[in-house]
Amino acid sequence: MSLVKSLIATTALTAAMFSFAAPAQAQTRIALLVKSLGNGFFEAAARGAEEAAAELGDVEIIYTGPTEPTAEAQIEVINALIAQQVDAIAISANDPDAVVPALQRAMDRGITVISWDSGVAPEGRAMHLNPSSNELIGNTIIRLAADHLPEGGEVAILSATATATNQNIWIEEARKVLPEYEGIDLVAVVYGDDLSDKSYREAQGLMQTYPNLDAIIAPTTVGIVAAAQAVTDAGKIGEINVTGLALPSEMAGHIHSGASQSFAIWNPIDLGYSAAYIAHALATGEATANEGDIIGIGRVGEVMIGENGEAAMSDPFTYDASNVDEFAEIF
Amino acid sequence: MSAVSHSPRNIPDRLESPFKSALKSWEMLLIIVAIAIFVANSFASPYFLNPWSLSDATFNFTEKAIIALAMAMVIISGEIDLSVASIIALASTAMGFALQFGVDTPTLVAIGLLVGVACGAFNGMLVSGLGLPSIVVTIGTMSLFRGIAYIVLGDQAFRGYPSDFAFFGQGYVWWVISFELVLFLALAVVFYIILHRTSFGRSVFAIGNNPVAAQFSGIRVRRIKFILFILTGLMSGVAAVLLTSRLGSTRPSIAFAWELEVVTMVVLGGVSILGGAGSIFGVVIAAFIMGLVTFGLGLLNVPGIVMSIFIGLMLISVIGLPVVIRRVRARMAA
């Protein structure tokens, strides 16, 4: 008889573990599906999405994702979201191709699908939201240096490898906007190969070759940290400003020491906020995602859908002494 | 002459009636747990009892369950194969590679299955030919097979599989009944017959209980183990075809860490990890239980980490329960 009793106990236990109260349903349910849970970057994006939901009203954000950052695990979550008949899925994908069949099934069943951060192939989503664009990044890295050089001055770029596609495109875009910044003179582009020691030596070399150097721009997180260290070690804090693209957690120390006045990278809160806004607009039919369409994204502004259904959110977000500590805890 | 008095002894034909023993069996316990989870899911989420939802849910476990059928036999024979997920990666990579030369769908499937068999034969050769412990061999081939896939693909992907290839992992045989589910159930019947209705199956149990005794009884232990590894290789090849078709692309990280989920399914199904005991029926129900639990919790948007805790607790309690019951019963009898 004890077998029967324990079976009843197991059954009751199982039932109890499942009996979560079903929440009242909002008008629009948007799933923010991330690569994996427990990642500060995505937690911050979820905070932004909740902020957008509060502004839009009657929107429920379902923040979800697999434990393992794999496509297979993410597809299981997609299946569960399809079954729940959510109104929209905004995904940061673990694999641009493998999730496509599952997302196509979601779209077949009337669910709006967009991707953000890490994109999905065009046939698997309505649009993709990039945090920024090459033009905006190229402009931002020059502006970061120019902001602290009102009289103009000499700047040099410390890049990753000479063949790094992203960096080369950004440098190309930076050169294009250079004439708009009067007095800013780009004296050299050197390559630290995204290695700490090589980047450090290249930064030292720049300081020796160009004694009047005012700023080093490193559009790579390895390079910017190495350059900031090289400037610190050379005792040139205050003379040379190191800036570029970096993660707040790695740069917080150099911001406080003054080796770097400011740097930039995407803001995950804004990204989650904008993804929620766009998903809501498309799911409710307030907007469409054809090439050339413009979609409003609240306080961040608006985006225009470009080639391949891709859109760029905004300039990279600038971090300085006023906000770096808050974001250093996130990513 | 001393009088020896024998107390009358009654030796029954059977220990219990078949009905009563079936009621107390592991499979019965699993069926009750499965029903409980099904009922609980139906109450917990309004979306659960929908034919399309339930159909979608089966995709989450059919590929793993197909491997679990063969894995059950390997584990019953006292061995283990931890390279199954890596065989999927290598078979899928081979299919993607062949795709670059424009081969048709039947050839793609044949390549997937053949690579699976070849990997299984390699494992089998090392285990039964050289007599190496299977856990060591398959941990090695786990890295080896996936390593080859990484060398071929790096951070790239093979895509552009033909549209009729999509049927295996995305197609439906009738209404909401998917091809994957039908194939799994058909293979379950085949494996049931092999394990429980043939002399080959009896030999597998005999080897798992005592390989030396089995050898002396005239059972060709090494040959049978070799065949078992080929079978897991073949089933991994089948899973590779299904999964590649379902994802429509190949990356070297495909099916990452599936081996542990497959072993979990087998153990939950009542197969003794020490070998010698288990049934295909139990493994089939365990597959459905794991599918229902993960899908049910997914519908409630329970975070994945909580889900793995739940699966872990379920595994421990289902395995621990019979032991506890036996202890309690022994104490009450004493």
Image: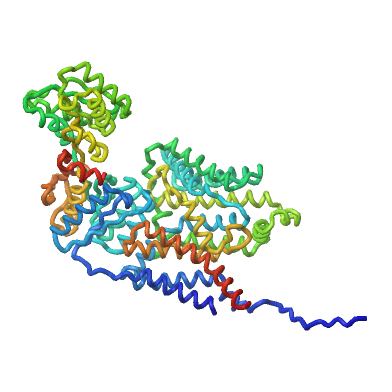
Asked whether B305 or A63 is in front, the reply is B305
Q: Is residue B212 left or right of residue A276?
A: right
Query: Number of numbered discs present?
Result: 0
Please state the horizontal and vertical placement of residue B325, each as a whole percent of the image. Answer: 55, 72
Can you give x and y, in whole percent of width and height, for residue A36 in the image? 33, 50
Figure check: A25 above or below A149: below
Q: Quadrant of residue A136?
A: top left
Residue B151, how many percent across, how many down? 44, 35
- What's the colour scheme? rainbow
**Which residue is pictured at 20% across the width and 20% down the height?**
A188
Q: Is residue A217 left or right of residue B303?
A: left
For the residue pair B144 and B234, the one nearer the viewer reads as: B144
Say if B275 sits above or below A257 in the image.
below
Viewport quadrant of the N terminus of chain A: bottom right
Can residue B208 be seen at all in this image of the molecule?
yes
Percent coordinates x, y for residue A194 in the rendering: 31, 29
Q: Which residue, as the protein is rendered here, is positioned at the far top?
A: A209
**Looking at the image, which residue is at 6% across and 25% down?**
A151
Whether residue A162 appears in this view of the structure is no
Asked whether A296 or B230 is in front, the reply is: A296
- Where, quadrant-wise, is the C terminus of chain A in this rendering? top left
